[in-house]
Amino acid sequence: MAKKTRVEDIDSNFIINSFRRDDMSIPPEARTNGVESEKQEESEDESPMGKEAGKEEEQKTEEMPARRRRSKDREQEYLAAFHKEVDIPARIGKTVYIRKEYHERIQRILRIIAKDEVSLFSYIDNVLTYHFEHFGEEIKKLYENNSSIF
């Protein structure tokens, strides 16, 4: 008979971070687990500069509400830019292949954040629209610099 596990005994952070360490699509600084970062924080507090770091943390906590507002604004900006349906039917577009990891990640994002109201086609179209709007000038310059080759 299997041993029953109590929910209180499960360390969710450990489980989540164990997956992060294996996922190479996540930046290295995001793959570390909380235990390692807590140990680093403790060692910083024990150092002679720990008192100065404490003062800096107090200043940071005073700035937190402004950061949260900015973070909320960025979240709203993200939702407005990427989580909207496009008017073009997907069948008019072209077939494109993406990495399996990216496909799975985008599907999870759309399932959870967009509540399955945005299609994969719309999300990718929105990402490309953003890319061309923000990097259009650079793309044009690079194209002009390289078009003289042909």
Image: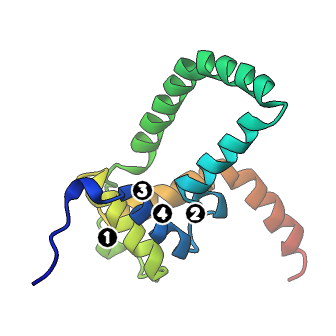
Q: Nearer the viewer, residue 79 or 36?
A: 36
Residue type at mark 1: give it: Ala
Mark 1 — residue? 90
Residue 31 is labelled as 2
Q: Does the CB distance between marks 4 and 2 fall below 8 Å?
A: yes
Residue 53, given in percent of the width and then of the height, sits at 76, 28
Q: Give how far apart the Cα atoms at labels 4 and 2 are.
A: 7 Å
Quarter of the image with the N terminus in it? bottom left
Q: Give how far apart the Cα atoms at labels 1 and 3 are.
A: 39 Å
Q: Residues within 10 Å of mark 1 (few under 14, many from 20)?
A: some
Residue 117, given in percent of the width and then of the height, sits at 23, 54
Quarter of the image with the C terminus in it? bottom right
Mark 3 — residue? 13
Residue 17 is labelled as 4
Q: Quadrant of residue 131?
A: bottom right
Q: Does the CB distance between marks 4 and 3 fall below 8 Å?
A: yes
* Label 3 or label 2, whichever comes before in sequence order: 3
* Label 4 or label 1, whichever comes before in sequence order: 4
Q: As drawn, is 117 to the left or to the right of 132?
A: left
Q: Nearer the viewer, residue 11 or 83?
A: 11
Q: Residue furthest left?
A: 1
Q: Is residue 113 visible?
A: yes
Q: Does the CB distance between marks 4 and 1 fall below 8 Å?
A: no
Q: Give how far apart the Cα atoms at labels 4 and 1 are.
A: 36 Å
In the rendered image, the vertical position of residue 56 relative to residue 8, given as above or below: above
Q: Nearer the viewer, mark 1 or mark 3?
A: 3
